[in-house]
Structures are given as C-alpha cells and as structure tokens.
Amino acid sequence: MEAENTPTEILPAHECWRLLRNAPFGRLALCIQGIPGIFPVNFVVEHGTIVFRTSEGTKSRFSEKAPVALETDGTLNDGALVWSVIVHGHAATINQTSELLNTVTLPLHPWESGRKDRFMRLVPETITGRSFTPLQASTHPQGARAPDE
C-alpha cells in the first residue's frame, strides 16, 4: 500500500496558544551544567506566559539566563490530526509577593507527591507549531515495545 502524501501544516501563533491552553502537560527541556534534561510538567497559560510548579530539585537549579523549551503535543478529531507546539524562551522563579499571590490562585495542582512550592514562569521568545494527518495505522511501522514479562 502506498503512503498518502500528507503535508505538515505550520500553525499560526494564535492556534498554538489555543492548543497550549488546553494541553494537560508538556515536556520542559533545559540544560544543567551542560547536560540536557527533559522533564514532564503540568502548566497553565497566563497572560502570554507559561507558569509551572516545581520543587527545589533539578528544574529549579538551571541558570535563569539559559534558554529553555516547552513541548506539548496531542491529537484532535479522534486521532485524525496530530499536532505539536514548542515554546522557546527563558524561565525564572516567581519571587514578587504580588505576583505569587496571583499565581497561587491559578488552576495548577501538582501531579506528583511532595512539595512543589516553587512557581516558575516561562516567558516565550518564539512559539511554533505544526499539525499533520497521520498515515493509516496499517502503513505505520511498529514502534518500540517493552518486552513481555
């Protein structure tokens, strides 16, 4: 069976923001002492920025001058459309009392146990997104699978 030609569509910024607002979580990519790391985070969009919570661990130890990226993806129309959005920018700890008071009322609740009392804000420099129609399942090569136990 021949694969259909399904072009990738570049998403406009307003569509990227719409998808971000509805995404349940993303992956935060950053470098700490030259070592790249990717961390799942839940987040909310607030005033054109992305707010997430973390603990005093790895995600809070990166240089606030260093670039970070947040990626999220999903499907629409029962899997008929696949999308991905990437935000590049810088993240900083929210320290100002007035800003913290506004932030704690956001619908941002930790998924993992433990203290997540550090709020951080990613200020975007670029936002990009794309979508495409996936190939039919019968034309997909099988992906990696965990061994049966």
Image (cartoon, rainbow, N blue to C red):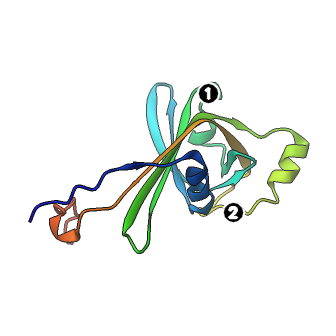
Residue 141 point in image, percent of width and height: 16, 61
In contact (CB < 8 Å): disc 2 and disc 1 = no
Residue 118 point in image, percent of width and height: 72, 46
Amino acid, disc 2: His
Question: Residue at point 66% right, 50% down?
Answer: 52
**Please, is residue 81 above or below residue 100 in the view?**
below
Q: Which residue in the protein does label 1 denote?
A: 63
Residue 135 found in image quarter: bottom left
Residue 44 found in image quarter: bottom right
- Image side of residue 48 versus residue 29, left or right: right
Question: Looking at the image, which is closer to me, 23 or 148?
Answer: 23
Residue 8 point in image, percent of width and height: 35, 50
> How much space separates mark 2 and mark 1, taking CA atoms?
25 Å
**Label 2 crowd (10 A; few <14 / some 14-19 / many >=20):** few
Amino acid, disc 1: Ser
* Label whose residue precedes the other's in the sequence (2 or 1): 1
**Please, is residue 138 above or below residue 15 in the view?**
below
Q: Which residue in the protein does label 2 denote?
A: 109
Residue 53 point in image, percent of width and height: 67, 51
